[in-house]
Image (spheres, rainbow, N blue to C red):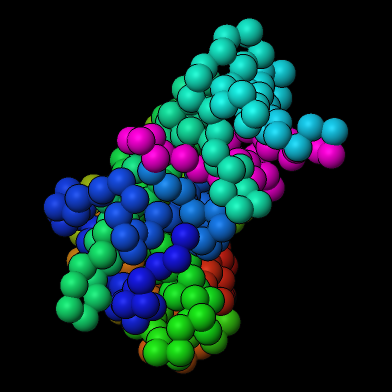
Amino acid sequence: MKKRAAALTLCLALCLALCLALAPVTAEAAGSVYITAAGNDILPLNDATMPFLSDGYLYVASSIFTGQVNKSLGVAYLPSNVSNPNLCILYAVNNRSLMFDLNGNFVRDSDGNVTSRGAIRRGGEIFVPASIVAEFFKLEYSMTPLSVSAANEASYGALVWFRQPNFGLSEKEFINAAFSQIAMRYEQYLREQAPEDSGAEENPGGIHLPEGDGKSVYLCLKAGDSTAAQLDVLDALNAQAAFFCSLEFLENQGDLLRRMTATGHAVGLLADAGNAGQTVEEQLETGNRLLSQATMGKTRLVKLQNGDERDRQAVQEAGFSCLEAELDWSDSGLPDSVQAENLLRQVSSRRGDVRIWLGGAAGAAGLRAFLTAAAQAEDRCLALTETP
């Protein structure tokens, strides 16, 4: 699928948030770029396997159902063999399968049902109807319009996203969270296309994330209503954080506390020097007692609120380590990819490792976007220790 030369000099402007609904998607639109995602992953972008529309149906390359996509969706691709090069099979671990016969232009499922909407061969790839695959294997899929702006015109495409039911994010939330991955795939695609067009820029435009220096980043959050969703994101992206817990949380959320410690996250105590009912020392003693009841462990990490230097000294004399964050992002919050990129730029501008206090203002989408961008910048998000 040859793209217009103008597409090679595009400055990527994926219209996320409110602009998504404004970009139309037309079948076989010239210059359209269709980006594929499966579960958490944005797949490599190239012309050979790019989805396309035909007669109002979306077709995706059967070969994408391998590797990580196979693991995340539970659907595998069986390549055609020499004895029957016109047969393409997709199957799941429960022995359910779809068999696409290119000679007869039909698909037969393992239940014996036959559908006339078959596969299409383009070049060396076999493309299958997305709706049939999703319905049979009980997956969800969507095609969300994306706008890509050029110097003098706008080109349109879409994100084609397959996922398991109850994935937990809406299309808009996922695109916001995956913003950096999408930009990276698109820029890589432009670079690969550039040699084919002598008039293309050697360094195409786009969103360029700050280069990382391999530093360690310590995310510190206030445990609360969003903790379960935050843990889901952290665990999915193999990142760690520190959760500072109030006495109420420690008393009522034993399951989440056990999950934190079992998956390598750090647990700290929230102490309020302005609490008239309990001294800071009493709060810390009670907090560790509750933590021990839930996890059989204790902590020396403390986030002191409403305290002065005298209070911090008292905490240290009691054998605890107060969180002193280089970046306080609790007011800005982390709701989406925009703030995630702003935070990453702040991190990249600093020398050495960085402790970040996010408070209770980190949404799942924004956290996912930051972790993804930090990984691309070669930064490591680790659990805070007493002396990082």
Residue 213 appearing in the image: yes
Q: Position of residue 64 (x, y in %)?
A: 60, 46
- Magenta stretch: includes residue 327: no
> In the rendering, at what x and y percent does residue 185 appear?
47, 67
Total numbered badges shown on the rendered structure: 0
For image coordinates 53% across by 69% down, the residue present is 375
Q: Position of residue 306 (x, y in %)?
A: 23, 66
- The residue that appears at 54% across and 38% down in the rendered structure is 120
Q: Camera-side residue: 285 or 87?
A: 87
Q: Position of residue 117 (x, y in %)?
A: 48, 25
Q: Nearer the viewer, residue 347 or 99?
A: 99
Name the residue furthest top: 112
Side (left or right) of 14 relative to 300: left
Q: Please report the residue visible at 36 percent of the width from the left and 71 percent of the height from the top.
A: 4
Depth check, front residue: 171 or 141: 141
Q: Is residue 75 magenta?
A: yes
Q: Residue furthest right?
A: 83
Provide the residue span drawn in magenta: 54-82
Give 55 or 175, whichever is nearer the viewer: 55
On the rendered structure, is 43 left or right of 230?
right
Which of the 4 image quarters holds residue 181?
bottom left
Question: Going 37% across and 77% down the picture, which residue do you hit?
Answer: 5
Q: Is residue 305 left or right of residue 270?
A: left
Which quadrant would the C terminus be assigned to in this image? bottom right
334 shown above or below 252: below
As displayed, is residue 349 above or below residue 307? Answer: below
